[in-house]
Structures are given as structure tokens and as C-alpha cells.
Image: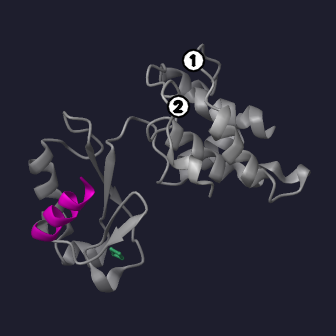
Amino acid sequence: MNDSVKKIPAGLIDQDIDHAQYYSLDGTQDGQALIQGWVKDAIDDHLAKYPEDQRQSAIMPALTIVQNANNGHLTAQSMAEVADYLGVTSISVYEVATFYSMYEHSPVGQYKICVCKNISCMLRGSDELLDYLKEKFGVGLNEVSADGKYSIKEVECLGACGGAPAIYIGNDYYENVDPKRMDEILEGLE
Ligand code: FES
């Protein structure tokens, strides 16, 4: 992926979308377009991998890029923009965006802590870890801490059952995470 994808230019973040529109699939809003500049370039990099009549193959990377550009979550407008730009139907984008758990439809913290909730991790303390995080940040699941830095999410098996409990934050995975290890990880984020 292009290094520029990591940069989030000022002015591209639009958190004032009416989420009621999200359910109507009518993404037409008056907000600033997201797919321009580095966002457009990054999507184009992915489109170049596929034949012109297979632009729908870029839905997942396009959603990821647009989500990153929108402070970590999708909106009706951003999904509609992806559909328009790729030349696919809105429902095609909506289906992908609502099926995969890595796409968010409400604001998240700067650091989204994803904790596996499946059996191996549960038996090895993921519930206690979640309780620890909720108390530490004063939030429930899928809520954002008052300083905007942290949110907590339960996710399905991460394929790291041998190192349960497992979590991921951004692109980094961690295993055998107890509250003490969690604090070390959080310190490393700063
Ligand atoms: S059950 Fe948690 S990683 Fe598999």
C-alpha cells in the first residue's frame, strides 16, 4: 500500500453525517468529498490490479482507505462515494461494509482495541481483560473514551488460539494479553 495512505489530511474528516441516511442507502450529502487527492490515488492503485470490468474487486480496499480517511469509520456518504467511484451499486458496497467486522459505522477511538471473544480466549481471560479495559477507559463496548483515544470492540477468533487471549490494535496483533501486558502495550502506543 502507498505510504501516503497513512496520512489523514485535515479537512477530509466528516463526522457530521446524518446516520439515518445510512439505512436508506441514500448517501447523497453536502459534505466534502472524500475520494480526492491521496485517497483517490490509493484507490486507483488497487483498481490498477483488476480488469476494467472487475472494478467491484476493489470494494474492500476502497472501503478500508475511505474509512481510514474518515477517522476510522464509514458513513452513508463515504459508502455512496465508493459505489459511485467504482461504478457499482450502492447495495454491493453496503453488503460488504456491513458483513466484515473491520468496517465501522460509528466513530471509534484513535486506538481501537479489538479483543477476541471466542472460546479459547474466553477460557484464558478475555472477559476479565474486557472488564479491565472498560473500567480503565470508562467506556462500554463500541464506545469512545472521553479523550477520543480509545474504543473497545469484541471480535471473532483471530486464529491465534494458542496464544489466547489475543487482541489487535490497528495492524498489530498481540497474544497472551492480561491486564499487565495490556498496560505495557498501551504505553507502547504513545
Ligand atoms: S479463540 Fe481467540 S484467537 Fe481463537
Residue 88 visible in the snapshot: no
Residue 33 visible in the snapshot: yes
Q: Start and end of the magenta stretch?
A: 180-190
| Secondary-structure class at tag 1 | loop
Left or right: 114 with respect to 132?
right
| Secondary-structure class at tag 2 | loop
Task: Find ligand 1 in the image and state its quadrant.
Answer: bottom left
Name, please, the residue furthest toward the bottom.
162
Q: In the rendered structure, which amino acid carries the disc numbered 2?
A: Thr
**Residue 184: x percent and y percent?**
16, 66
Residue under the point 10% across and 69% down: 180
* Residue linked to disc 1: 31
- Taking 168 as reference, is 69 above or below it? above
Quadrant location of the N terminus? bottom right
Residue under the point 48% across and 19% down: 18
* Residue linked to disc 2: 75
State the colouring used for the structure image.
one colour
Residue under the point 40% across and 57% down: 170
